[in-house]
Amino acid sequence: MSADLKDFRGKITRETDVALEAESRVSGRDRADIAREILHAWAAKKLHEASVLSALALSGGIAGIPRERRR
C-alpha cells in the first residue's frame, strides 16, 4: 500500500491485543499492517454509507448538511 500514511497511537483492549497477536503469528504480518488494514476497511465502509445516505436524502428532497455545520 503506497497511501499517504498518518501517525496514530492509541490504546487497545486486551482482546484486541490478543487477536492482533494471533493474526500476526498466523499470517506472519506485522501487527500495525493488520490494524491499518482493518481500520482502512472500516473507514471505506463508513464513507460508502455516508455517500449512500447523502444520495438517498437528496433524492428524497432532504437538504444536505448546511455549510456552516461542515468542519
Image (tube, grey):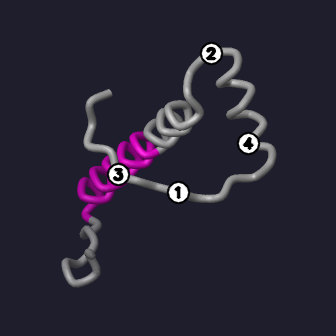
Q: CA distance from mark 1 to mark 3?
A: 10 Å
> Is 55 a magenta residue?
yes
Q: Return the x and y of residue 23 as percentages of the image width and height.
A: 68, 24
In the rendered structure, the answer to whether residue 65 lies left or right of residue 12 reads left
Q: CA distance from mark 2 to mark 1?
A: 23 Å
Task: State the image quarter where residue 21 is shown.
Answer: top right
Q: Name the residue at 56% across, 21% down.
A: 29
> Is 64 a magenta residue?
no
Within 10 angstroms of label 4, few (less than 14), some, or many (20 or more) residues? few
Q: Return the x and y of residue 55 as percentages of the image width and height.
A: 27, 50
Q: Return the x and y of residue 40 as percentages of the image width and height.
A: 43, 39
Residue at which label 4 appears: 17
Residue positioned most to the left: 67
Residue at which label 1 appears: 9
Q: Mark 4 or mark 1, which has the lower sequence index?
A: 1
| Identity, as a three-letter code, of the amino acid under mark 1 | Arg
Residue at which label 3 appears: 6
| Identity, as a three-letter code, of the amino acid under mark 2 | Ser
Q: Mark 2 or mark 1, which has the lower sequence index?
A: 1
Q: Return the x and y of residue 48 as percentages of the image width and height.
A: 36, 43
Front-most of residues 48 and 32: 32
Front-most of residues 49 and 63: 49
Q: Main secondary structure of the magenta part?
A: helix
In the rendered structure, the answer to whether residue 21 lies left or right of residue 69 reads right
Locate the N terminus by quadrant: top left
Q: Mark 4 or mark 2, which has the lower sequence index?
A: 4
Q: CA distance from mark 3 to mark 2?
A: 24 Å
Q: Which residues are magenta?
A: 43-61
